[in-house]
Image (cartoon, rainbow, N blue to C red):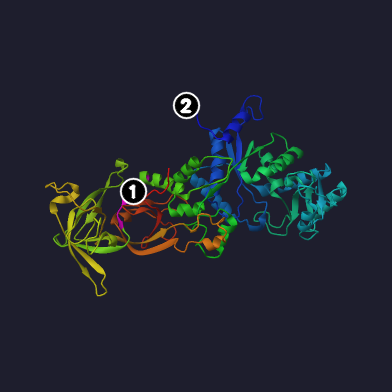
Amino acid sequence: MEENRNFIQTYIEEDLSEGNRCYGMQVHTRFPPEPNGYLHIGHCKALTIDFGTAEKFGGICNLRMDDTNPAKEDSEYVDAIQEDIHWLGFDWGDRFFYGSDYFEKTYELAVELIKKGLAYVCELTPEQFREYRGDTTRPAVSPWRDRPVEESLELFERMKNGEFEEGRYTLRAKIDLTSGNFNMRDPVLYRIRYIEHHRQGTKWCIFPMYDFAHPIQDALEGITHSLCSLEYEAHRPLYDWVVSNVSIPGIKPRQIEFARLNINYTVMSKRKLRYLVDHGIVSGWNDPRMPTLCGLRRRGYTSRSIRDFCERIGVSKVDSTVDWALLESCLRDDLNENARRLMAVIDPVKLVITNYPEGKIEMLPVENNPVRPETGTREVSFSKYLWVEADDFSETQIPKFKRLFPGNEVRLKGAYVITCTGFNKDENGNVTEILCEYQPDSRGGDPADGHKVRGATIHWVNALDCVDAQINLYSYLFSDPDPDGSGKDYIDCINPDSLKVVENCKIESSVKQYAIPDRSSDSLSFQFIRQGYFCVDNVDSRPDHMVFNRSVALKDSYKK
């Protein structure tokens, strides 16, 4: 059966075939994030394509920080980006670069373009240039387009030396003022900015535009295929113009575009995500409701599930929106196979087995993961006093309710059959204790008398040695599936019920054996039986105060 391939892989195979541009060469890609925020799930698609494509063809992939715009860049983001990529299982070896490493060379190549008559210093402000730019029916004009080469060279050097205020001059490429692609109508290559760079300090006060710097960086690094999202398709002619007109030896990189990832119930703009952080709408970039990789990791998403998600959505040339439920389904599939089971009671009420011996403790064997029998069993303690879920009890019999009510019997998970005999209330009318009797010969689900239980099987924890915990129940951060396109401000779409904090939950005592994981590793995840998949919060948890985040519910809502 022929292996499935996406259109990017088809293009690369053509380039590698005999007689074509990359014949006999090693495929070389790059992932160039801007260090002005944390990576989110949208970046994840791009980096899996960049690194994954190189892996498929036995090639290499560079990691390059696109730090040519110093306004919001910071070394904090550089470290976080590297941590997230390693967490996903990719590595760049010794091929780690900064776009700012090429500032000197980029400046030299700009000077070369001026000398060739392909660039000039312009005095139009952005507002004025919009007036001169023309439209689809008339060409652009620029009164500075024919500035003498020597004059542009002198002004460009003085720009570099800091002799002019911001906005006074720009360096523009001289391409085609009649082009139907407005990116080719003498685009800006350099602008003046007096701002401290996170690595270069104040050495530079002119900075190259992305459309000029990026193709030069690709060419200098020997990139064979520059893979980027679809919004750069209209910029490809400018990319090709730059690499064709500057003097860089070796192969000219080929730009290939793919559709970016859009997911419902979230936003992918780093600017908008930063607003949520800066205004305290979320607790930080790693808030478990955020689509950032550090937030997803803290929520309990695994690197395996995210790579599986990227594999399932594939590579396309057409923009579309993916259902967040697919990402949840990928996580659920992974955790169902790999997460250990625990019993946890989120809304506890005391259950007393009145005919069970006072002071007796039994240790009952329970499977760690029925999907993987090789994980064995653990021992769970059992006593006269248990905690069960409040909604597993009803004071009266109601239709189709098969759990605890006076006169009904249920099975305790992995333990005994019990029959409800009554209950106690406090002065406010709240049920404080459920009273039951157990059948001593019914332990483990194989009663000697062959008795079949009419009611359900419910989970429980031993009240004498359980662990108190806080549980965070998360749902979508936005109540609207399209917060960017709903016609409302995306802030107005914030879901006020995206987090419910539940204190005084009860977890079986075996959880004590697990250490709180490191923040950069996969979360410590469990299936709380009948409840969902939860992980230890690796930020707020302490040995004396365990916090669990609900990663995903048990029920799969994704329509496969």
Q: Nearer the viewer, residue 72 or 133?
A: 133
Q: Nearer the viewer, residue 358 or 550?
A: 550
**Among the two numbered marks 2 and 1 on one chain, the one whose residue lies closer to the N terminus:** 2
Q: Which mark is residue 1?
A: 2
Percent coordinates x, y for residue 241 in the rendering: 74, 40
Q: Is residue 238 left or right of residue 459?
A: right
Q: Magenta span covers which residues?
A: 338-344
Residue 340, disc: 1
Q: Work out whether residue 189 or residue 140 is closer to the camera in this orientation and state it.
A: 140
Question: Which corner quadrant holds the C terminus?
Answer: top left
Q: Is residue 160 visible?
A: no
Residue 242 appears in view:
yes
Residue 94: x percent and y percent? Answer: 58, 42
**Circle 1: residue type:** Arg
Residue 96 figure quarter: top right
Q: Is residue 65 magenta?
A: no
Task: Identify the residue at image location x=24%, y=60%.
Answer: 398
- Point out residue 455 in the picture as x, y percentages from the top left corner: 21, 53
Distance Cα–Cα, label 2 vs label 1: 37 Å
Report the residue at 62% width, 44% height from top: 230
